[in-house]
Amino acid sequence: MMLMRNESSPLDQTEMIRASNRRVWVMSVIVILIGFGLTAHCDLVQADELAQAGASSEVVDASDLDIIDCHTHFYDPSRPEGVPWPDKDSALYRTVLPRHFRDQQQYRPVTGTIIVEASSRLEDNAWLLNLAEADPFVVGIVGRLEPGSADFAKHLQRFAANPLFRGIRVSVAVIQRLLDRDQLADLTLLADRGLMLDVNGGPQTPAVIAQLAARVPKLRIVLNHIGNVAVTSAPPPEAWQAGIQAAAKHPNVFCKVSALVESAAHHSGQPAPDDLEFYRAYLDVVWNAFGEDRVIYASNWPVSERGASYETLQRLVFEYVSEHGTEATKKFASLNSKRAYRWTERPGRRNGTNDL
Ligand SMILES: [Zn+2]
């Protein structure tokens, strides 16, 4: 690095040597730490100390981690028109808004979210966009429209005029039908507009996504909930593994690690285990196939409450990903979703939203 002499406050020669020595010392310490495999300790070194010492650093303070939860649901049954989901007799039937989400105990502070629309009502896309516009914590919504229906293009034109509208979610049955009928014009239109597609369904979903990705290669597709495979103490089913590997062969397919704890609880009839080892084989299948550039953090809150607390589900996946290093963790937390959803920054997003 070249030192520039500043006319108004000349840098004293001794100071220059001292600063230079400090840099050499700091860099030596880092090299030694890395040499002993103690890179984790670098995280404890305050970035500002390094900056003062004149060293450029890639050290990231854990509190600086930008975490976008890419799968939340918000709704308000007290609206005059009510809500079509969840059912009245469900524990989820209550007002659930971003502020309630922020009140959840978290393992690491969540700094933003992408909401996924679960309501089948067309106008609820507008309701969700209004909610998003009012709160910079929301970086985007995944709406709900029916590709293949008569007015799809018209509705897409309307909602996509709002840049917070990042794409749509559909069920795998819809995708299978469109593939069978060779009716892919609406999905191509989605891709042409730079929007993306979330797909939800059972363990056959990844294999269907692989077919779609081959047919519409410019469409960015996000597999929901790792394909809702039954997460149990048994090894991951081979057909599901093959589907994940087939989907991951297509560079525009991403995978959200949401709904693990709901699946574990659902298939055991008990609260989900809170030990990472229970989930590891399933996470390994996803990670080994998609790699660190295409796995995305997402929770499925508040539905995830059926399996475990938010803090627990978040800890499980962040414990897993942190084993792959700081860069991989940053990608998982927000950088990969930025590529998948092309969400854009919102002024004020990280101010005053972290209550923890
Ligand atoms: Zn969901």
Image: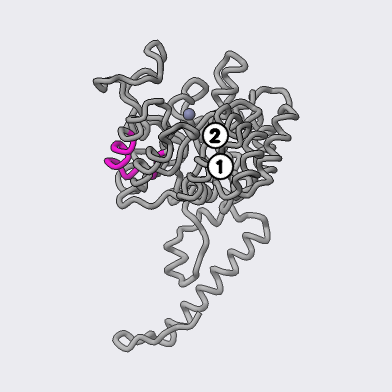
Question: What SS does tag 2 mark?
Answer: strand
Q: Quadrant for residue 10, please give it.
A: bottom left
Tell which residue pokes out farthest to the top in this image.
89
- Mark 2 and 1 residues: CB-CB less than 8 Å, in contact? yes
Q: Is residue 81 above or below residue 192?
A: above
The circle drawn on residue 188 is none
Tell which residue pokes out farthest to the left in this image.
80
Instruction: Report the residue at 43% width, 87% height from top.
Output: 13
Mark 2 closeness class: few <14, some 14–19, many ≥20 residues within 10 Å: many
Say which residue label 2 marks.
199
Instruction: Report the residue at 64% width, 36% height from top.
Output: 283
Residue 299 horizontal/vertical position (percent): 49, 33
**Considering depth in this image, is 7 or 203 the residue closer to the camera?**
203
Residue 280 horizontal/vertical position (percent): 66, 33
Give the spatial CA distance, label 2 vs label 1: 7 Å
Residue 279 horizontal/vertical position (percent): 64, 30
In the image, which residues are magenta? Answer: 128-141
Q: Is residue 307 above or below residue 321?
A: above
Question: What SS does tag 1 mark?
Answer: strand
Instruction: Report the residue at 49% width, 69% height from top.
Output: 56
**Considering depth in this image, is 352 or 339 the residue closer to the camera?**
339
Earlier sequence position, callout 2 versus callout 1: 2
Q: Quadrant of the C terminus?
A: top left
Mark 1 C-beta closer than 8 Å to ligand 1 = no
Specify whether 322 is left or right of 99: right
**Considering depth in this image, is 109 or 26 the residue closer to the camera?**
109
The circle drawn on residue 221 is 1
Q: Amino acid at mark 1?
A: Ile
Tell me if residue 106 is in the magenta stretch: no
Mark 1 closeness class: few <14, some 14–19, many ≥20 residues within 10 Å: many
Q: Amino acid at mark 2?
A: Val
